[in-house]
Image: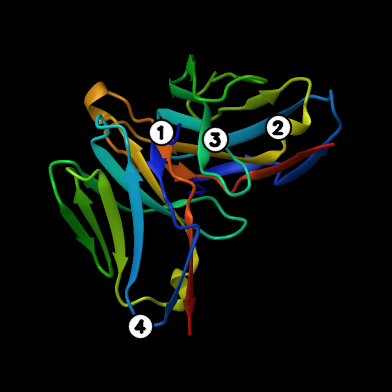
Amino acid sequence: NAGVTQTPKFRILKIGQSMTLQCTQDMNHNYMYWYRQDPGMGLKLIYYSVGAGITDKGEVPNGYNVSRSTTEDFPLRLELAAPSQTSVYFCASHRGGSYEQYFGPGTRLTVT
Amino acid sequence: DQQVKQNSPSLSVQEGRISILNCDYTNSMFDYFLWYKKYPAEGPTFLISISSIKDKNEDGRFTVFLNKSAKHLSLHIVPSQPGDSAVYFCAASNYGAGSYQLTFGKGTKLSVIP
């Protein structure tokens, strides 16, 4: 049982490039989330999903896209990367009826 | 507009003493509160939670207190251990609206000195 896994761990992008951050969970959780954490700040919600095929925007969705074709996977797509997207990205999941979110180890992204 | 505030960025405590981490919230619709612990280069891990129908919840060395009238909660760690050194995030949710979304504070970095 690996829990929530995220790849890559680190990535440096040039301005204008695009990439996909991968997130997979093996706990059969319906709910999945993407957060970003900037230095000295709390986690801010980018997008979330309540099940396969259903996604919705969080607090800071601009510049990002998501898809949820399976229960296990919830990739986050960055198009036209900007320096403001330099951050640590966390994926999380939980089962319905529980507030306890399980987090992945994070992806540290730098856009220069 | 910060709805969940952790006004102390850092806290240092001697090993064996009590650590008290504070959290304030402004949204009166929040009805479920959680504390997460985060070590460097790792994701946050769930520590303890409390529903708004309670004013206290204990789990071993960790106790969370909720004062709804003051919109304030605190996490007590007794006794503090060096392994407790981490960043602690307070989070809140509005379960009554059917939402599991969490609003996080900025975190408090706890250092437990041996």
Tag 2 residue: A85
Q: Residue furthest bottom?
A: B114
Work out whether mark 1 precedes mark 2 in sequence or the reverse, and give the earlier one. 1
* Circle 2: residue type: Gln
- Badge nearest the viewer, 4 or 3: 4
* Residue sitting at x 62%, y 42%: A38
* Circle 3: residue type: Tyr
Q: Nearer the viewer, residue B74 or A64?
A: B74
Query: Which percent across, then down, holds residue B26?
Result: 32, 36
Q: Dots 1 and 3: beta carbons under 8 Å? A: no
* Circle 4: residue type: Gly
- Badge nearest the viewer, 4 or 1: 4
Q: CA distance from mark 1 to mark 2?
A: 27 Å
Residue A21 picture quarter:
top right
The image's mark for residue A29 is: 1
Q: Nearer the viewer, residue A6 or B66?
A: B66
Q: Chain of mark 4?
A: B
* Residue sitting at x 29%, y 74%: B78
From the viewer's perspective, is B2 left or right of A76? left
Depicted B114 relative to depicted B35: above or below: below
The image's mark for residue A48 is: none
Query: Which percent across, then down, holds residue B7?
Result: 43, 52
Depicted A68 relative to depicted A103: above or below: above
The image's mark for residue B16 is: 4
